[in-house]
Structures are given as structure tokens and as C-alpha cells.
Amino acid sequence: MSLFCLGFGNDVDYSFLDVMAKENKGLARRIFVASDASVQLQGFYDEVSSPLLLDVDLCYPDNTVDLLTTNYFNQLFNGSEIIVAGRLSDNDIDNFLVEVFGKGPEEDFQLQGQASAVDWDLLEKSEVGTQEEKGNATAKALKMSLQYSFVTPLTSMVVTKDGPDSPLIADKLTESQRQKAERGSGSTGHAATSHSHSHSKHTYQKAARRIGSSGHGKIHSHSDVDGDPHFLIKLPERGDTLCFNIDDKPGTIFNLVRDPKSGFWLNGQIIGKKKVVPDGHISTYFGRFGIVHQTFGVRLDVTTQDISVSYDGKHVKLLWSEITSLKEPNLDLRLMKNCSLIVTLRHSVKFMVVRHTKVWKKRHYQQEYLGFYTLDSHLLSAAVHGLLGQFYHGVEFEVTNSEKPDATMYVKGQALNVTRHWQKDFSRDVKNGENVSCWFVYSNGTGLIDGGVSDYVVSDLFKTV
């Protein structure tokens, strides 16, 4: 019998859950509150609901391999891997026999780098067993970490730079230390060389803040568009959000993201409100997205009616009423309930498209429209641009009198009048959304976006030039 543990949020004692799962032939996973919990739960279920092998035992000839890591595994799940590492006793051996025993169909295995795998195997052993066994495993892991310059919860890294400033220290924290550090600062550090762990958590937090604010590291944002249409530029490192609207006539197509280096393009077409109000003003929304990844040969045509997917010479049409998935080497597509589509393009980008149905009961009509949410864009190149893409690597700005609803924003060498607005964000709650406070930039984002809004108009939904 196996025990699987889930930990929700940052307040749970995840280390306890992890040890309890390991001692009972199971797995532990954290469910992050900042993401779509239902997607994470579905992913965890998809992993553990498909065991391929049970009681997997890899046996090596006697006197052939030293320093062997764990070679017995309770189960192998679909989509997971088994890694066994060791050191050959005789470097002149070209090949040797490995026998794999298990309950289930025959399965391949792979040997990978000895030092790193041994190190993490010892770290896992340092959490389970008697006090003496834990101490021995910890000592061995520390020795190997220092020998091979690995960064583990037992070691730290030092960032050095030219100038009089002292080196910055960034640790790889244990689970409990990481939780406390996140609660205190919400930051993480980056660094480069390993040494023995002798620095306090306070030093780590201070260094992480200095690194995050130095301007030398990349700052990533989440750029989204929804509503009629509202653009949201969420900047987690700043703890703030910028927003602007785009007004144009129905049928206009805008380039939202273009990254020639990776081959990813996103264009969106404006549609008008079905029912025109008496004053003649036409509310507009995004009603169709054209998404292309030239390198992978992937093309998606997303409308308010259906989703057309083309890849490797194949064509699939999906309806928003379906709950289904499509998994290929370079494409992972999941159509979820509440009309949300999550797409991952390998080593490129992850995004979500939401189809909304807004109903005016008293006026007896409804409006369907689309929202686009960037979930992960950090692998796109520095050349990425477009109405959304230009903000993927952040934007520098300052706001004066930020405690007031009306303020002045200094951005890209200009002073802009901005106002505190509230916009709906559906990235975490697809059904109801959540209100997000943002600094609203007037006149189609003039001064915030590069150039004018007309510079982003394209002639075709799938234009990639």
C-alpha cells in the first residue's frame, strides 16, 4: 500500500509530508496557491494513476559498479523516469549486463551522471532513518557537494562582481527554510560558486533582495489581455500591475507576441459587441487568436466556437464543450472545464486561452469573447515583442504620489498621468476571476507601449513577418 501526500500553500509542513510519503512507498507534491490548483491536482493524478512497473529492481554484476545509488523502486509511473548511477570499478569495460526485474511490462532504463545523482540520493537518505544514518548520509552529501561544487541545502553560492561591493550570498534552502524565506521576502537569489554552509537565513534574504533589485538579472512579467480588451502587465518583482485598453474597429488584427528567434507568434482579431447600444459606441473584444510556432510546425486557430490544431501534418478540431488533452513531443494541450485551454510549447512558452460568455439577462442577449493569459514566457528570447511580448522581460517605471488614486508615472523617458483602476484577472479563477488593482495608462497605452497602436496592426491572423 502506498501513501501519497499533497500540501496546499506555503503554511503546510511539507518536509513532514515528504518524509511520510517516502516511508510509505509514495510521493509528495506541493500545490502552489499562486497557480491554477485544479491543473496541478490533475497533473498529479495523471502521474500517479498510471503505474507502469511495480517493485522495480536493477541488478548489476558483482564487482562491476561501486557507489551505487538506490536501485530498487516501488513503482514507475507513466511520464516519470528511473535514474541509477554509480562508478565503474574497471574503466576499461565497454559493456556489461544489467538485469531489470519488475511486475509489469518490460521497461527501458538510463544511467546518468554519477556525482550529481549520488549527491541527491544521499540527501534523500539524510531525511529518513535513524539519527546515525541521517548524520552519515549528510556528511557524505556535504563532502561530495564541496568536491564537485554542487549547490544543495548543505552548501551556498557566492556572487562576486567588479567593484567595492562585498560578495552576495545565496543559499539553496531546505524546504522549511525556503518557506520562511518566501514569507519574509518573496524573493529568490542567483549565484555561482559552492562553499560550506555557514551563512544565516537573514544573509540569504538580504542578498536575494540586492540581487533582485540590482537590475543585472532578468525581470519577468505576466502580460495578459481580456475583456473589452484590457491589457494587464503584472510585475511580481515590483508587486504592482500596469494596465491599458485598446480601442479599434471590429475586424482589426493586432500582433500580440512575436519572437522570431524561437519562432513563436500570436495575433488576435477584434470583434464587436453583438448588440450596439443607443449612443452608437461599439464595445470590442478579442474573438479569435492565431498562434504559430514555426520551428515546431504548430498552428492553432482559436475562436469563440472551436479550436483548430495543426501539427506534423495532422489536423484536429476541438469544441469548447469538450474536456480533453493532446500530448506530442513539442506540444502539450489541455482543454479544461469552464472553457479554458492550456497550451505548453516545449522550451518556448506556456499560455492559457479562456472563452467567456457574458450574459445580459434583462436585455436577453449574450456575448462570447476570448482572453489570453501568459503563464510562462521566460524561455522566449530578449528580442520578443508585440503588444504583450514587449513586456515579457519587464519594464522600468516609477510612480510619484502612489498612495493617491491619480499619479504621475515616469516610464521610457516620459511623464504619464495614470489612475488606479480595477480589472478582472481570470488566470487563477477561470470561472469568477479576481479583481486586480493596476495603474491605468490612457490613450491606448500611449507612452507605455513602444510606438503607436497602429504599429501593431497586421493584415493576416497568421502573419509571421
Image (cartoon, rainbow, N blue to C red):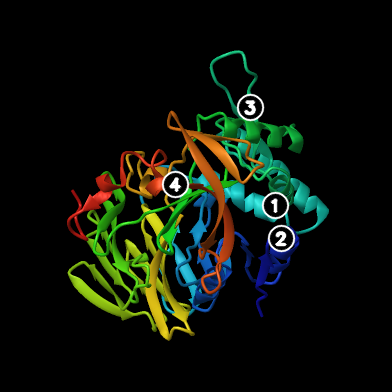
Tell me if mark 4 has few (under 14), some (14-19) or many (20+) residues whose alpha carbon lies within 10 angstroms of its own: some
Q: Earlier in the sequence, mark 3 or mark 1?
A: 3
Q: Which residue is mark 4?
A: 442
Which residue occupies the foreground of this view, 85 or 303?
Answer: 303
Q: Residue at x 67, y 70 (%)?
A: 5
Q: Image check: 117 left or right of 350?
A: right
Q: Residues within 10 Å of mark 3 (few under 14, many from 20)?
A: many
Residue 288 appears anywhere in the view: no
Q: Which residue is mark 1?
A: 175
| Disc 1, SS | helix
**Type of amino acid at the residue the image marks with label 4:** Tyr
Crowd class of label 1 (few under 14; some 14 to 19; many from 20; radius 10 Å): some
> Distance of mark 4 from mark 1, alpha carbons?
44 Å
**Nearer the N terminus, badge 1 or badge 2?**
2
Q: Are marks 3 and 4 in contact (CB under 8 Å)?
A: no
CA–CA distance between discs 2 and 4?
A: 45 Å
Mark 4–mark 1 contact, CB under 8 Å? no
Q: Disc 3 vs disc 4: which is toward the camera?
A: 4
Question: Which residue was labeled with disc 2?
Answer: 14
Residue type (three-letter) at the residue carrying disc 3: Leu
Q: Earlier in the sequence, mark 4 or mark 1?
A: 1
Contact, CB < 8 Å: mark 1 with mark 2?
yes
Q: Which mark is residue 168?
A: 3
Tell which residue pokes out farthest to the front in this image.
Answer: 279
Residue 104 vertical position relative to residue 165 in the rendered view, above or below: below
At numbered mark 3, what does the secondary structure look like: helix, strand or loop?
A: strand
- Tell me the mark number nearer the camera, choosing from 3 and 1: 3
